[in-house]
Image: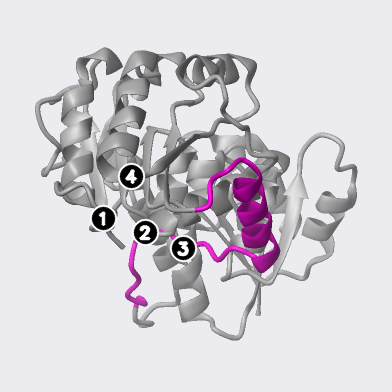
Amino acid sequence: MKILALQLKRIGDLVLTTPALRRLHLAWPEAHIALGVMGGTAALLPAIPMIQAGIVFGRGRGFAPWQQALTGGWDLCLDFTGNDRSAFITALSRAKKRVAFESIRKNKLRALAYNVWSPSRVREEHTAQYYADLVTSALPGGVAVPDVDLVPELAMPARNREAASTDLEATGVTGPYALLHPGTARPEKYWLTERWRAVAAHLRETHGLSTIFTCGPDAYERAHVADADPDFKSPRDLLHLAALVERARIVVSCDTAVVHLASAFRVRQIALFGPTNPFHWRPLHDRAVVISAAQPGAPLTEFHPRMKGAPMERISAEVVIRAIDDLLGRGGGVME
């Protein structure tokens, strides 16, 4: 059996699709699964263990990916994306079963590409559950739904781990460290730089951790991070960033892709949410702490689909520091 899965959205969506891919693999363990992605997320393909091939779409890729979609001989195509490009690829695949979310039916032209529908509603589910539901809708009637953990999964290639170790040693980081990632795609998600500096100082002075700041390639993001730490080093690519996240003792970040990378490695993490609802995007493992600007006095313990957002400056450095102490131990020692 040949399966084409399409996730043409951003990094976070791709990482949160991995539980669905795990469900897909468990349902059809002998299947050949190819994952279609955009160029901006393609670097993560070697770290996704449930797939046998990747197809990369986007500028500069030419006709090759479209030809792969057309000539793949697919039995099943699952569209996790739901935009014009993914609908066209789905139609091009000529798969016998072509699956999308029910909401796509509102666009009559896109709807022509599909013949199976998932009733799952994005506003009512965590994003990982929403994507896993699409696989459930693809299963034949009477087939049991594989039970999967909704925590995402990545498996770093050894060469990327080794490269991260070499780079850390070159900058003088030879022991345990905390990774702080202030950057994000939306300006309103940024936290105040002086609070990042306070958190970094606490990690060094109280917990004995080196601190490294990371960011993406965006110029505004780089300037913001440089204001918090003038000596920061930008990861050379997405897999390098993932390798740094995997090795960290704790990760503190805004609501951005690093939240999902840390979740995939089950690293201790603190995720700061401002205007967005953490119900849909929060890390689901038990070493994660979520702090929302809408309820900034303490980490959240309950989540629901209609939660409101608030400006990021409502989150104090003190509440983040208390959460760090709870995760790492108040005695100041570095926990394993």
**The residue tagged with tag 2: helix, strand or loop?**
loop
The location of residue 118, given as percent across then percent down, is 41, 55
Residue on which the image places disc 2: 266
Say which element carries label 3.
Answer: loop
Q: Earlier in the sequence, mark 3 or mark 2?
A: 3
Residues at marks 3 and 4, CA–CA distance in whole angstroms: 29 Å
Give, as a three-letter code, the residue at label 4.
Gly
Whole-percent x and y of residue 212? 49, 37
Residue 157 in picture, x, y percent from top left: 65, 65
Check residue 171 for magenta coloring.
yes
- Can residue 225 be seen here? yes
* Residue 282 placement: quadrant: top left
* Residue lying at 26% horizontally and 13% vertically, measured from the top left: 313
Dot in front, 1 or 4: 4
Tally of numbered discs: 4
Mark with earlier residue (1, 3): 3
Stretch in magenta: 145-174
> Label 3: which residue?
153
Q: Amino acid at mark 2?
A: Arg
Which type of secondary structure does the marked residue at label 4 adopt? loop
Q: Closest to the observer: 326 or 29? A: 326
Image location (x, y in percent) of residue 81: 55, 44
Question: What residue is disc 4 on?
Answer: 208
> Crowdedness of circle 3 by 10 Å Cα count: few (<14), some, many (20+)?
many
Q: CA distance from mark 1 to mark 4?
A: 20 Å
